[in-house]
């Protein structure tokens, strides 16, 4: 039977990083006046039952959208970077660099490569640049938005070294 330290080390090797890109509370708060205004526009002149139905539909649609948008996960585990629904083997990674807000903005905009693989959210300003080892790959790099770019880049670097 292994010691507690061995189990912790094994678990650390299996899952080095995990983050869910939840939508911030401000987006939820901003959705309230949006639902109120759009609902008022659509039910104006109709009965109270129509108003209730319109608001119910708007609340369900907006809440569903925000929940789905914020359910995206980033994980470094089992030799793979999973970002949203996509996976990248760590053996394919050339480099991983944490980017501050201004550096990430450049790679989202003026310096962006249209072939790059992007996982972005407007409420996340920082990101990690993941350069690919194969220059012939479909995407020249991955740009992954995160709240903790230094931790994600460190996990990718450490996991990549373990894989090699």
Image (tube, helix red, strand yellow):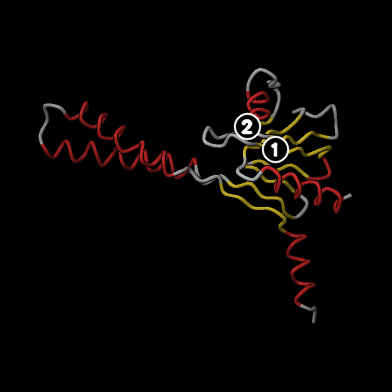
Indicate whether 66 appears above or below 43: below
The circle on residue 62 is: none
Q: Residue at x 85, y 27 (%)?
A: 135
Side of 25 where 78 appears, left or right: right
The x, y position of residue 36, in whole percent, is: 25, 34
- Could you tell me which quadrant the N terminus lies in? bottom right
Indicate whether 14 appears above or below 46: below
Q: Residue at x 67, y 42 (%)?
A: 149
Q: Nearer the viewer, residue 87 or 120?
A: 120
Side of 145 where 51 appears, left or right: left
Quadrant hosting residue 59: top left
Q: Nearer the viewer, mark 2 or mark 1?
A: 2
**Mark closer to the chain start, 2 or 1:** 2
CB contact under 8 Å: marks 2 and 1: no
Q: Residue at x 75, y 72 (%)?
A: 7
Report which residue position mark 1 lands on.
128
Side of 54 where 73 appears, left or right: right
The residues tagged by marks 2 and 1 sit, at their Cα atoms, a distance apart of: 10 Å
Label 2 Cα neighbours within 10 Å, binned few <14 / some 14-19 / many ≥20: few
Q: Residue at x 59, y 47 (%)?
A: 73
Report which residue position mark 2 lands on.
101
The secondary structure type at the circle numbered 1 is: strand
Q: Nearer the viewer, residue 108 or 54?
A: 108
Label 1 Cα neighbours within 10 Å, binned few <14 / some 14-19 / many ≥20: many
User: How many numbered discs, if any?
Assistant: 2
The x, y position of residue 6, in whole percent, is: 80, 72
Side of 72 where 133 appears, left or right: right
Indicate whether 120 appears above or below 3: above
């Amino acid at each position: 039977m292994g010691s507690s330290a061995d189990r912790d080390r094994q678990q650390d090797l299996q899952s080095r990083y995990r983050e869910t890109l939840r939508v911030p509370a401000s987006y939820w708060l901003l959705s309230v006046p949006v639902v109120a205004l759009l609902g008022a526009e659509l039910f104006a002149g109709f009965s109270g039952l129509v108003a209730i139905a319109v608001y119910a539909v708007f609340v369900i649609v907006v809440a569903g959208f925000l929940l789905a948008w914020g359910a995206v996960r980033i994980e470094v585990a089992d030799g793979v970077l999973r970002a949203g629904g996509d996976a990248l083997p760590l053996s394919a990674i050339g480099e991983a660099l944490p980017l501050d807000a201004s550096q990430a903005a450049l790679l989202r905009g003026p310096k962006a490569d249209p072939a790059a693989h992007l996982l972005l959210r407007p409420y996340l300003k920082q990101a990690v640049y993941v350069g690919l080892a194969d220059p012939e790959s479909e995407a020249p790099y991955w740009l992954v938005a995160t709240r903790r770019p230094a931790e994600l880049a460190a996990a990718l670097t450490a996991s990549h070294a373990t894989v090699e």
